[in-house]
Amino acid sequence: MAEALNRIVVIGAGFGGLEVAMRLGGSAAQVTVVDQRNHHLFQPLLYQVATALLATSEIAWPIRHLLRRYKNIDVLLGTVVGVDKDAKTVQLEDGAMLPFDELVIATGARHAYFGHDEWEPFAPGLKTLEDATTLRRRILTAFERAEREADPVRRAAWLTFVIVGGGPTGVELAGTIAELARNTLPGDFRKFDPADARVLLVEAGPRVLAAFRPELSDYAKKALGKLGVEVMTGQAVTGLDAGRVVLGGEAIAAETVIWAAGVQASPAATWLGVAPADRAGRVKVEPDLSVPGYPDIFVIGDTAMVMSEGKPVPGVAPAAKQQGRHVGTTLLSRLTGERTPRPFRYRDQGSLATIGRRAAVVDFGWIRFRGGFAWWMWGIAHIFFLIGVRNRLAVALSWLWIHTTGTRGARLITQRDPEARDR
């Protein structure tokens, strides 16, 4: 029997990294999980924090708490800045070096601005809790500023919300902001009607939810229209600065712009040096999810370009979890001396997106749903994947209350925007 490789470092405690760690919990390996934040985040519901539907504590859990029962797992709060694949060490920002026998990189992705990073201050994306609370502050502050604005042109700018990107995140954001304005806030303000808010969803492609079947995409567009969302397809952003977004040659005055148009992988490919990467910076891995030429280094989740049965694996939570389980099982096998590479097989569990209360689309490939029934299926699926009975119950009760009354309990501006502009 081969000697166990007992030092395994997992970078990132998202869906994939956490799955790897839990698979290795209680094994003979000494596992170290490193993350630059102390919490695991349920990203699919992050937009609900940004739009005051849920509180941060309902979709995030301390990593140490989740792994506390595994005595062979250490958790470190730190930022990785480099990997020496030949010396087998991970370098942290504070200079510390972590040796490893095997390494798993599961560091996720950030929003991408397609060569226009200067747009980020004016159009933040949504990937972290900090992003969500920043967006919530900007959205709620926009209504507060509209209450104080006497100039109707300036008030209209404060009440214009532009979401760039027509994927699931963009559609969900647009729908819930429209519901916030039309169903939740009316009656809270005296100088204007929040229902007058203008919500624009901008998509450069020919249709929203391009990954879904055309009939579901068409339904989503119509459902958004019923909520008052202006869906603008075939429109690319050509300019963006303070209080203005430019679509082609048309400038639109908007104080709140949200970016949901693309993602860029973490710097993992740069850390690894020779590892090939695609245009989004994702590492092109072997069929067993290892780095070419380095069978003891694995890359999973949004950081990896993964092929399964000739098709690229989508960057979604179920895929990351499946990859985490695959690598975790592989590493357990290696502890017993089994080193035969096992190709990863992705099982498509379907695609889901919600548009608003009582409206969603679900595509399982062999069967598709839309409307109210799909909305219930979407909710049940998301509650099922939450961690812990308390969180499942809290989110279910929050949704039931919002569904019944239209009232959102998380409408709190908890800190002043450091970039607030007095206009």
Image (spheres, rainbow, N blue to C red):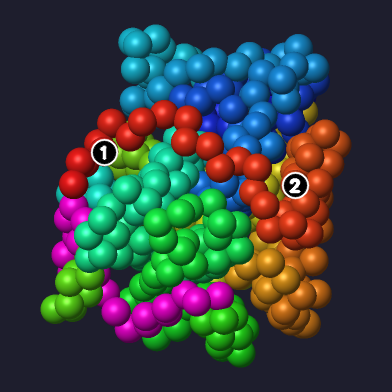
x 17%, y 55%: residue: 241
Q: How many labels were placed on the picture?
A: 2
Which residue is under mark 1?
Answer: 420
Is residue 222 or residue 216 the one in the foreground? 222
Q: Is residue 379 visible?
A: no
For the record, the magenta segment spans: 227-244
x 46%, y 64%: residue: 193
What residue type is disc 2 on?
Answer: Ser
Residue 28's disc is none
What residue type is disc 1 on?
Answer: Ala
Is residue 71 or residue 148 the one in the foreground? 148
Q: Position of residue 333 (x, y in %)?
A: 75, 35
Which residue is under mark 2?
Answer: 398
Please tell me in which quadrant of the rendered image residue 76 appears: top right
> Is disc 1 surrounded by few (<14), some (14 to 19) or many (20+) residues within 10 Å?
few
> Is disc 2 surrounded by few (<14), some (14 to 19) or many (20+) residues within 10 Å?
many
Image vertical order of residue 380 relative to residue 361, above or below: above
Side of 418 where 217 appears, left or right: right
Seen from this angle, which residue lies furthest left? 249
Under circle 1, the secondary element is: loop
Q: Position of residue 182 (x, y in %)?
A: 55, 66
Query: Most prominent secondary structure in the magenta stretch?
Result: strand
* Cα–Cα gap, marks 2 and 1: 31 Å
Query: On the rendered image, what quadrant is the N terminus found in?
Result: top right
Please tell me in which quadrant of the rendered image residue 115 appears: bottom left
